[in-house]
Image (cartoon, grey):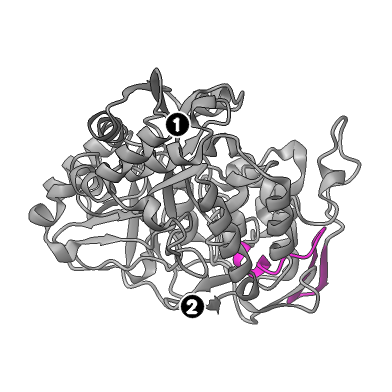
Amino acid sequence: MTEPDHLVPGWVAAGSSFSILNALYAPLVALKPDGTLDYVQAESVSSEDSRVWTIKLREGWTFHDGTPITAQDYANTVNAAAYGPNAWGTNGLTINIEGYDALNPESGEPKTDKLTGVEVVDDLTLRVTLKAPNGGFPLWLLHPGSPFKALPPAAFDDMAAFEESPVGSGPFMMDGKWEHNREIPMKRFDDYQGPKANAEKLVFKIYQDGGAAYTDLEAGNVDILGGFPAVPSGRESQLEDRFGKDHVVVSDAIGATWLGVSKSDERLQDVRIRQALSMAVDREGINEAVFGGYRVPSTGIYPPGWFGGSTEACGPTCDFDPDEAKKVLDSAGGIEGELVLYYTPQGQPKEMVEAIANSFRQNLGIDVGIKAYPTAADYFEDLAKFEARGLVVGGVLSSIPLRDYGLRSFQCTGQYLMTTGGHCDEAIDARIAAATAKPAEEAVSDLQAVEEDLMAKAYVLPLLWNGTIFVGGPRVSEMPTKPGSAYLDYAGVQVSD
């Protein structure tokens, strides 16, 4: 894995840290393989109005040092994440809780460090009041970096010192200290109240890139590669031949890649132009050539790993039909000048973007250029000006498998609107907000209807859905993934001596 930013829930921002948290800290809830909610440290998460939620904890759970876990431990973590001056990475996950604004004033220092919407009822009961109803709140708790994970009281004496050898509550506990840029050693927590880990030890080795990690996997120096860092681009097609089919697994598809049509490009405002571009892309061919067949050609926006599953909302527009694409493009007047694809290799592989560009050149006969931003920060900063003319290679790897969470990229107030080209509709935003207030199961059909409307306009051209590829060495016999996530279930991994 790559070097984490932190080992404390709520403080983290990097994806590599999420893997650590899954091993060190027990969550309140999880997903079953059938997509329904399972309870871990929580006995129940309930509400009568989808705004005031009561979380009841199971009795008997402890931290790794034997200290009993209480509702106050959860409240402390959530308050710390919400307190603006702390600048914790998942502060935004508390934005919908009552009292957030007081902890994050537009100017000056907060006058309190406690959320009014977080109340400790008793040792095993926490009450959370949201600003507005959100029927999917229990699923929001699935975020791997969620501040709704308990920290022991001692952590708050010196958080920086604490995370060098943190005391958690998960299936694994620290077995020494975090050796920065080298490894993070753990051992099985034998008193864990959930399913016990199969492996006696778990060591996260830290790499700067996937190439060195892959070399060590081949040499037998590590047992598993995947996630952060990822399998090196171009190696996917070799994995089954090199390691065996049973040693390659892919997590649920909770990621999506798309082309966002720039709202600033007047050449692309005819829906027929956008549909022609979509039909000109050989999604299956790109999947096989670039990703070894481990991704899934998109038939809509929502990946199948999101709550409620995927749809066929894209229809024929997502079918590869180069002849029809050329006819439709010509009937709409074509595209004059160069069509530019904007991307960052920190988000998408160069080979995929070049394959898309070649599809347009060969199947539509148009001039295509590529602009690569060296870092994700450069990509977001420049595209946020909404001045790009062409197509933005964007996407999402949702840490919460909820449609309304993933749809933030399509909302006028969305943080990542630039990745979908900048098109938005306040009426669509209102429909998303209304659906969000409903229980997650009831919101699915409403949000599917939103997706159908977005697809009809074709301002976003879906490309591929993806999970995370994990490769195991010869010692690995079981390598389960966590349902509805991009991560391994480390407790379920089986290795031989």
Q: Is residue 236 above or below residue 356?
A: below
Residue at screen point 39% across, 59% down: 253
Q: Quadrant of residue 190?
A: bottom left
The residue that mark 1 highlights is 391
Distance from disc 1 to disc 2, alpha carbons, whole Å, reads 47 Å
Position of the C terminus, as image quadrant, is bottom left
Horizontal side of 457 relative to 231 (left or right) equals right
Q: Is residue 108 visible?
A: yes
Q: Which mark is residue 369?
A: none
Q: Amino acid at mark 1?
A: Leu
The extreme front residue here reads: 331
Is 134 in the magenta?
A: yes
The magenta segment is 118-141
Is 300 in the magenta?
A: no
Q: Quadrant of residue 453?
A: bottom right
The residue that mark 2 highlights is 194
Position of the N terminus, as image quadrant, is top left
Q: Position of residue 327 (x, y in %)?
A: 32, 39
